[in-house]
Image: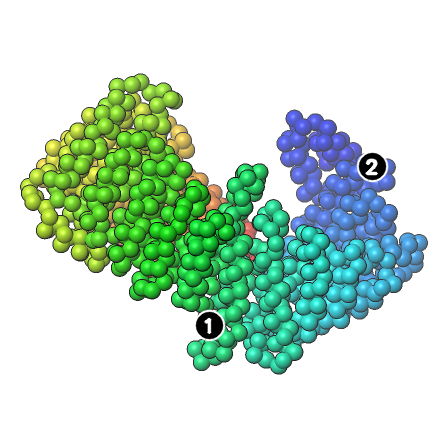
Amino acid sequence: MEYTAENVEQAVKQFYLNPSLQSEVHFWLTGAQISPAAWSFCWSLMAPNKGLEVQYYGASCLHVKIVRFWHEIPREEYESLKSKLLESIVQFSSGPRVILTRLCVGLSALVLQLLPDNWPGAIENLIATFQQEGFASLPTVTRCQILLEVLTVLPEEFFSTNLSQQRRIVLRQELTKGMDHVIPLLQSLLTDESPLEVYQSSLKAFSRWVDFGLAIDRSEPIIQQVFSSLHNPHLFDIACDTLVTVFAHPESYRYPVTVQRLLSQVVALQGLFSQAVLDEDKETCERICRVVVSLAENHTKLIVDSVLGPEEVKQNTMSLLQMILACTGLPGYFPIDESCSDQTFTFWYLLQDELTNVSEEDLTPLMEVFKPIYFMLIEVLLVKARHPSEAEYATWSLEEKEQFRCYRQDIGDTMMYSYSILGDELLAQLVNCLVTLVEQYKHGSQEWQSVEAILFVFSSVSENVSSEEHVQIPKLFSQIREIPFANSQQISTALHMIGSFAEWMQWHPETLSYVLPLVLEGISNPEVGTAATIALKDITRENLSNIQVYAHQILTACQSTLEANVLKSRDLLRLMSSIGHVLSVMPSNEIMQYLDTMIVPHIQHLEALASMQPCPSNRADVHTTINIFAWLFGSLDTEMEGGEQEQQSQHQVKKQTQQNTTEPKPIFVILQKIYPSVQKLAYLWIFDMAIIEAVCDLFKKALQKLDDFAPLSGDLTQLVINLYQRAPCTPVIDLGKQLLIIFGLQENFVPLSKVIVESVCSRSLDMFNVGMRNYTDVIEGFMCFLTQLMKKLKKFILRCNCDLAAIFQAAVLSMALPEHATVKASCSFVIEFLNAGAESEVIRNIVVNHGHLLVDRILRAIGGESQRGIIDYIADVIMALNKHYVSQLAGWLKLMVDNDGYPSPRASRQDKENFVKNLLRDKMNKVRTREVVKEFTLLCRGLLGTEYAEAAAAFL
């Protein structure tokens, strides 16, 4: 259908009236918008008798043409286009507003296209134009508003338009010159005599020019006027937004003297803020808070420098800090009663960061000022971190509860920053406060929320507490025994806090006797089971050298909990992990005694599940039961080794306690018992990826701990092969990869290794014949599998009966898939394959015979068929070719040079010759090779030299 005004108008109407055709109509209208005919029909569509949707489409067309297709219009038509656009703005001066705004955006785009040669002094000329006869018929207020709208969108259009770097520099210079005329205009309009609409538009325009780069010292008179407008309720919101823009501008730090002068104006808002707090005016509080925080966040160095300055400056700075504390400590609960205290957290982080960068000599006097501030902050945050009453909390929505949880996490982070300033003094204050509150709590004069908040804060700072701290933290844990816990939230927080100090306990094992009773009591309580099992898992993992004396106590409690069957699935798995850690420090005979008691019921349950047919009702049970053994295997290690002091100490314990090292490992004994059931479940649930992943995870964790795998090797090999043949998936191929890496070259396993490799390769190659895009995750796993084989079992794979040529071609095909991870894995294998050609004649012949396919794939990717995010991987493949197949690569690239329009019609013969020359010259320089490939791919895509490409190049 021809792109005429009538056809376009009908299409726009169809777009809004017929939802079923929207996609098709949208495609057609997009084509119309970019067609040369749009320069003509856009004016017709903006006729007064047209509908709003049609007029808007016409105005949008005009903007698109000016921004993206400026080259289509002859220079001699520039002036007429400008005149018609100004006439249209006059036409729509009384509305509709949406069309007028769109035309003003179009005019700003026109200004950017014509500056500087074809419209010198455009901004000054525009300001004068709106005072001339052509606009004299419009009311003064309307003229001002239109002019201000154009001046507002002009900086916005500058930032949103795709420009070359050189063009952007030129335009920035021209717009900066234009500020000489914008500032006086705004000053003349920001007066008490100006109509409200004009004042609002002037503030908005000023804000955009500040964004552009209007210096804060140059605009100080206007900023003073903005502060004055805060007392007008109709201007308050937009004035606050403008001040936030002023103070948040990244260049404002260059003008400390001006900022200090303006600081007194900000501090003067204290009265307005205090009244808003009393009136519970949330919106006013939030707006003033944003102004205060924007100033503080962006001028922390000035604040630090000012607290020791002249008295007036110091007083203003201290008043600002008190205002921020007031913003942090707004009354009520976040986000119910207030929603802006969280805005201050970034400032407190930046302030401590600024202080930590001060030299030690200068820090001492500063600490005298800032330590009291931070102690006040701690008191404020302890209040804000408190939970509401259970009755009130029950009325909150799930979203509000989640916001409060995140808010508390932010409080925890802020406490951690405060610890870097206050150090052990913070711990001492918290411990003293806890002692007082616990005593009050015992006598009923204090609520549980206050105690819970302190415990939460301790868990927040735990990561920064030194292992050598031996005064305050022991007091904390001794105090834990004095707390009369009566609330599940309070207990959970205490348990999280205990777990957070698990690593510290490694150096202070005496504290285990204080905390283990609460933890072991918690694992049998379903309300706090999650926190308790997390704490127990952390303690047992981090304290292997200290846990043996508590082993019987822990295992007995775990046994009781298992029998009670009260835990959620995830909590149960963590409990099994803790059991594994504890058993790892025990003599072998005791390990099996405990396992017989604890694990037999689960083995029996696994056997029962294996006798059932798959159905949705027992799926979760199957998944959890398999994972029980996987998590146990993951933590049960009777021969721990390593360089960590704890592991070395544990190894000494093992030497002293284990009696018969010829006995099979506990994991092997369990694995023998459960293997038939696990195998049966794997076949029953073969198409359930979550269960197959759990099965594979179980075997992988077992393999990591077993030295002698021979008795089960044949069965597990057959399972891997059968599963992969029937339902190829990444977990199975990863299990096969681990089998090969750990046992592949052991004499008794070599025949099985060969079967695994041949089977996996054969089945994987089949996928490339039946729609490989449906198997991208499996192909990624297959490529990772091959990469590891080429790295660690290169000679072995050459002895297998695998079609290496087909595998090489499959890898080349995989490089064309859209998923980055799959392409990366494929390129990694190809690089290993190419490198192996230096040692293997078989592989070298394959590359020589089929390398043209690889180079074709590489060039198509560079030419634009693949996303730019994978170009670095492609460049690394080129480098491998350039290293081992220089003459062949040069020949394949010559074919590209001789093929017109390939790999992109945008690349000329000279461009391609330069690309080849640079590649071959810098073949040993990885960084340079990547740069050459990036530059050529941008050229092929038509992006070379654009600002967009320069911004994106860093991410390629």
**941, above or below 752, in the image:** below
What is the CA distance from the residue labelled 2 to the residue labelled 1? Answer: 64 Å
In the drawing, does residue 392 fall left or right of residue 513? right
In the drawing, does residue 183 fall left or right of residue 711? right
* Residue 113 picture quarter: bottom right
Residue drawn 46% across the image and 78% down it = 364
* Residue 633 picture quarter: top left
* Residue 89 image position (x, y, % from top left): 83, 50
**911, above or below 802, in the image:** below
Residue identifier under label 1: 357
Q: Would you say the residues marked 2 and 1 are in contact, meaning their CB atoms lie under 8 Å apart?
A: no
Viewer can see residue 424: yes
* Residue 385 image position (x, y, % from top left): 51, 52
Residue drawn 46% across the image and 54% down it = 440
Q: What amino acid type should be assigned to the residue bearing mark 1?
A: Asn
- SS at mark 1 in the image: loop
* Residue 598 image position (x, y, % from top left): 22, 33
Label 2 vs 1, first from the N-terminus = 2
Q: Nearer the viewer, residue 226 or 101?
A: 226
**252, above or below 928, in the image:** below
Residue identifier under label 2: 50
Q: Nearer the viewer, residue 397 or 718?
A: 397
Q: What amino acid type should be assigned to the residue bearing mark 2?
A: Lys
